[in-house]
Image (spheres, rainbow, N blue to C red):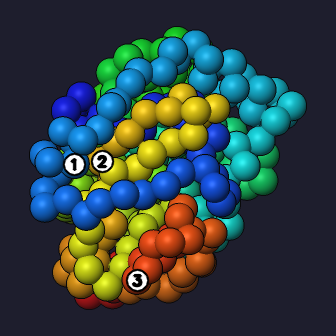
């Protein structure tokens, strides 16, 4: 994962949920024009590490919708080998382990190099490891579940990464907290001051784009989530499970 494809700051991704947390403005003709209208910032990873420590210790939760992921872990059959693309310091892993740990064989997080370094030094365990590239993660184990949790919409080249993940041929792909609508839209997401403020580009995918990218996959579950912005018409915020078609 490249810094030019930087996803939202870790703390923001941990806290951004529910209504009224952000507004979306646009449309923009391309990613570059949305980026020019943005004001990105970096978050101190030590803050997010403390939040992850709370989750690991069981004193807090990630507050994520885990049911699609848990379903995929069970549907994988046998033991799940998860590749968590953009998984930060493993907040979802620690929640999932409490609920389905005996069904998880391995959990490989792929994220930015500094996150991978901190993750391996502070949060890795017998199942959890952190990597800065998909290829490095594959050297450890081939996944049967690929998880993209609130990440693809913030990448400048999402289909480049999605095609690489699809090529791994896992049994299941989970796209969690994912915006999709009747057409592609590139907008700028504005956060509230208590979440650090800031503005960053975000993509709403079209149903047609996703269907083409996952042509060999069957959508087996979709869960509707609260919208980011009630004024946004023609788009949905969803969690989805895709299963690889036989043959």
- Left of 146 or right of it: where is 206? left
Disc assigned to residue 217: none
For disc 1, the marked residue is 34
For disc 2, the marked residue is 201
Residue shown at 24%/28% (left/top)?
3
Relative to 151, say whether 45 is above or below: above
Q: Position of residue 42 (x, y in %)?
A: 41, 21
Disc 3 to disc 1, C-alpha distance: 20 Å
Q: What element carries label 2?
A: strand
For disc 3, the marked residue is 234
Relative to 167, say whether 154 is above or below: above
- Left of 61 or right of it: where is 245? left
- Left of 29 or right of it: where is 37? right
Residue shown at 69%/26% (left/top)?
51
- Asked where in the image residue 114 lies, by quadrant, the reply is top left
- Asked where in the image residue 207 lies, by quadrant, the reply is bottom left
Q: Where is residue 110 in the image (x, y as percent from the top left)?
A: 38, 37
Q: Is mark 3 on a helix, strand or loop?
A: loop
- Asked where in the image residue 49 lies, by quadrant, the reply is top right
Q: How crowded is mark 1: few (under 14 residues within 10 Å), some or many (20 or more)?
A: many
User: Could you tell me if the residues under marks 2 and 1 are in contact, i.e. CB atoms within 8 Å?
Assistant: yes
Q: Where is residue 165 in the image (x, y as percent from the top left)?
A: 27, 57
User: Could you tell me if the residues under marks 3 and 2 are in contact, i.e. CB atoms within 8 Å?
Assistant: no
Relative to 11, say whether 190 is above or below: below
Nearer-the-camera pick, 209 or 18:
18
| Disc nearer the start of the sequence (3/2) | 2
């Amino acid at each position: 994962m490249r810094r030019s494809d930087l996803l939202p700051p870790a703390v923001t991704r941990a806290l951004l949920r529910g209504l009224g947390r952000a507004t979306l403005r646009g449309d923009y003709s391309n990613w570059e024009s949305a980026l020019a209208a943005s004001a990105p910032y970096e978050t101190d990873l030590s803050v997010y590490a403390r939040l992850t420590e709370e989750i690991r210790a069981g004193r807090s939760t990630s507050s994520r919708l885990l049911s699609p992921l848990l379903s995929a872990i069970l549907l994988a059959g046998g033991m799940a080998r998860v590749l968590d693309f953009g998984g930060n310091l493993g907040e979802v892993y620690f929640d999932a382990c409490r609920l389905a740990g005996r069904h998880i064989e391995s959990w490989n997080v792929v994220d930015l190099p500094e996150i991978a370094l901190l993750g391996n030094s502070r949060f890795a365990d017998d199942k959890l490891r952190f990597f800065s590239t998909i290829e490095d993660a594959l050297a450890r184990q081939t996944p049967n579940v690929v998880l993209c949790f609130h990440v693809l919409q913030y990448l400048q080249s999402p289909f480049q990464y999605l095609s690489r993940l699809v090529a791994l041929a896992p049994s299941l792909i989970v796209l969690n907290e994912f915006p999709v609508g009747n057409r592609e839209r590139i907008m700028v997401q504005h956060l509230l001051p208590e979440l650090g403020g800031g503005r960053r580009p975000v993509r709403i995918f079209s149903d047609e784009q996703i269907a083409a990218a996952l042509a060999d996959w069957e959508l087996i579950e979709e869960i509707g989530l609260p919208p980011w912005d009630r004024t946004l018409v023609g788009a949905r915020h969803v969690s989805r499970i895709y299963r690889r078609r036989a043959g």
